[in-house]
Image (cartoon, rainbow, N blue to C red):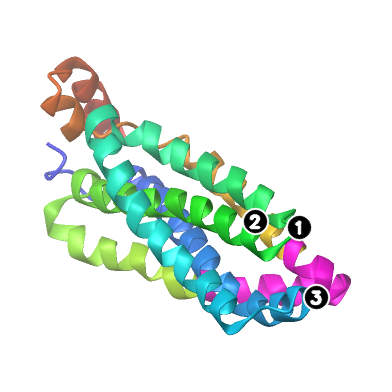
């Protein structure tokens, strides 16, 4: 029944919810490139510390994708949609108040774990919510938000540098990203649980109600 649905407002809400979160993921992955020069001066980073500041993010994403991917299969898509955003926001706020580079690296790793969970959640949602005949094009539309997020990361740091001195601007940049995460969380709360996941768990009545609502829209 989901695959037979024509493209509608219901699909637009799903794509918007996934796309804004994907844009946020890109912003967070890219923002360190805009901030690294500032951090080198503020904390007099060694080459090893500078490299680790960037690479630890990728390690955190890998860990988060595996852990939260498993949890999404076990407990459902929607709880993970919410949990990963809250996880990321909490550790990013803490990272903004880091007092040294090692504290910053540790908290960035933990924030990246939440973003890795986003990767898993978004990938599964694209497959489970969108009709087969449009899935490739709509997936491409969601993925196209990545360069938008990369541009926003540079603009965010530029905006922060315009109003704050460098040693405060990088902290303000992270906090601005958290505000965007709050916006993504607001949108994400409208996304339903995956009917396919509910069916796999024998919760057919709940799955049918979600599909019927989508059909009405």
Taking the image as shown, residue 129 lies to the left or right of residue 92, namely left
Provide the residue designation for mark 1. Answer: 99
Quarter of the image where the N terminus is located:
top left
Taking the image as shown, residue 68 lies to the left or right of residue 30, namely left
| Disc 1 from disc 2: Cα separation | 7 Å
Give the secondary structure at mark 2.
helix
Q: Which residue is painted at 23% across and 27% down in the image?
A: 212
| Disc 2 from disc 3: Cα separation | 23 Å
Marks 3 and 1, the one that precedes in the sequence = 1
Instruction: Say whether marks 1 and 2 touch (CB < 8 Å).
Output: yes
Q: Nearer the viewer, residue 49 or 117?
A: 49
- Report x, y in % for residue 19: 42, 57
Whether residue 158 appears in magenta in the rendering, the answer is yes
Q: Which residue is painted at 37% across and 50% down in the image?
A: 64
- Report x, y in % for residue 96: 71, 56
Q: Nearer the viewer, residue 194 or 49?
A: 49
Instruction: Specify start and end residues of the magenta stretch as a single range.
Output: 149-171
Q: Nearer the viewer, residue 117 or 200?
A: 117
Give the secondary structure at mark 3.
helix
Taking the image as shown, residue 127 lies to the left or right of residue 160, namely left
Q: Which of 155 and 43 is in front in this view?
A: 43
Give the secondary structure at mark 1.
loop
Res. 103 mark: 2
Provide the residue designation for mark 3. Answer: 161
- Packing grade of label 2 (10 A; few <14, some 14-19, many >=20) is few
Instruction: Say whether marks 3 and 1 touch (CB < 8 Å).
Output: no
Q: Which residue is painted at 38% across and 54% down in the image?
A: 116
Marks 2 and 3, the one that precedes in the sequence = 2
Residue 15 visible to an observer of this rendering = no
């Amino acid at each position: 029944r989901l695959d037979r649905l024509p493209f509608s407002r219901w699909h637009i809400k799903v794509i918007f919810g996934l796309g804004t979160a994907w844009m946020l993921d890109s912003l967070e992955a890219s923002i360190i490139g805009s901030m690294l020069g500032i951090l080198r001066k503020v904390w007099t980073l060694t080459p090893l510390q500078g490299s680790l500041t960037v690479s630890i993010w990728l390690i955190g994403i890998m860990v988060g994708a595996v852990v939260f991917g498993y949890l999404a299969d076990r407990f459902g898509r929607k709880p993970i949609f919410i949990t990963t955003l809250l996880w990321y926001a909490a550790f990013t706020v803490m990272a903004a108040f880091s007092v040294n580079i090692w504290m910053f690296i540790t908290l960035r790793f933990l924030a990246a774990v939440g973003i890795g969970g986003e990767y898993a959640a978004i990938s599964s949602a694209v497959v489970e919510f969108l009709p087969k005949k449009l899935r490739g094009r709509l997936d491409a539309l969601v993925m196209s938000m990545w360069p938008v997020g990369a541009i926003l990361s540079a603009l965010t740091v530029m905006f922060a540098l315009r109003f704050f001195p460098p040693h405060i601007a990088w902290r303000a940049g992270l906090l601005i990203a958290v505000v965007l995460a709050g916006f993504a969380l607001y949108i994400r709360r409208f996304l339903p649980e995956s009917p396919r996941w509910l069916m796999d768990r024998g919760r057919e009545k709940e799955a049918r109600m979600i599909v019927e609502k989508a059909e009405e829209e």
